[in-house]
Amino acid sequence: MKLKELMADYNPSEQYEGWVTNDDYVFAIDTAPGAEQPTAEDEFEVVEMGIAGLDAQLNPVTQDKQYIRAGQSTTKTGTQRSFAVTGDRYVGDPAQDFCLSHRMKYGTGNGVVTNYVYFNILTGKGEKGQCSIIVNSDGSGNAGESSAVDIEFRKIGSNPAEYKYQSAEVTSPSTEAVIGTGVIGTAELKGENEV
């Protein structure tokens, strides 16, 4: 399912206040990284079909030092973002088929890097960045059970950027970019004969 299809049923609000469940988070990936035309985020494939667990982790990198008369001190030197995805194999889901392709399972370096967005479906706030796809299992289990998959996505390169989901929907005849429930701008369109 494409991100725009999922979000057609939701209207995120920055003012949302209340409880949040794991189902309220969206993780979507670019299944055509490196294409001539960059893939719009609305066209990213949502990682959800057959997925039972999405474990988003912020793994801090620290350095401990002992200082004279100050004792032990810990300095945070970075953060390694990772997503652990587990579930059952569903052939025909674009996100699973991409991640479990021969190219991804055996690829290395830039060959397994893709773009992602991760955000809260209620507020629309989250992050976007790049990650390496690491396939730990492309199908396991006992006889008669579903075929289980285990895939990790780990940040690569620069830290993820802040992200706010915005619909790419544009209305006619003027170009009114509709975002959430409000209009952010209007530009008058001139006809071919106007000077």
Image (cartoon, helix red, strand yellow):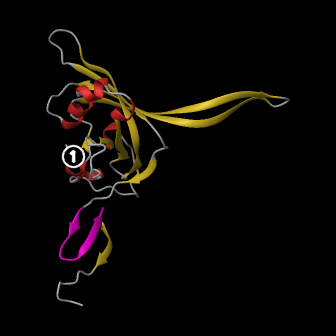
In the image, farthest residue toward the bottom:
195
Mark 1 neighbour density, 10 Å: few (under 14) some (14–19) many (20 or more): some
Q: Quadrant of residue 134?
A: top left
Q: Quadrant of residue 137?
A: top left
Q: Position of residue 31 (x, y in %)?
A: 26, 40
Q: Nearer the viewer, residue 18 or 144?
A: 144
**Circle 1 — which element?**
loop
In the image, farthest residue toward the front:
36
In the image, farthest residue toward the right:
69
Q: What is the quadrant of the C terminus in the image?
A: bottom left
User: Please, is residue 168 above or below residue 117 in the view?
Assistant: below
User: Please, is residue 41 above or below residue 84 in the view?
Assistant: below
Q: Which residue appears at 25% of the width and 73% of the height?
A: 175
Whether residue 41 sits left or right of residue 131 in the image: it is: left
Whether residue 74 sits left or right of residue 185 in the image: it is: right
Whether residue 121 sits left or right of residue 174 in the image: it is: right
Q: Nearer the viewer, residue 117 or 32?
A: 32
Q: Which residues make up the magenta segment? A: 169-180
The answer to if 89 sits in the magenta stretch is no
Query: Which residue position is annotated with label 1?
Result: 2
Q: Position of residue 113 (x, y in %)?
A: 36, 36
Amino acid type at circle 1 is Lys
Q: Which residue appears at 26% of the width and 30% of the height?
A: 51
Q: Position of residue 180 (x, y in %)?
A: 30, 61
Q: Position of residue 161 (x, y in %)?
A: 45, 49
Q: Which residue appears at 22% of the width and 84% of the height?
A: 190
Q: Nearer the viewer, residue 166 or 102?
A: 102
Q: What is the quadrant of the N terminus in the image?
A: top left
User: Please, is residue 66 above or below residue 180 in the view?
Assistant: above
User: Please, is residue 153 above or below residue 158 in the view?
Assistant: above
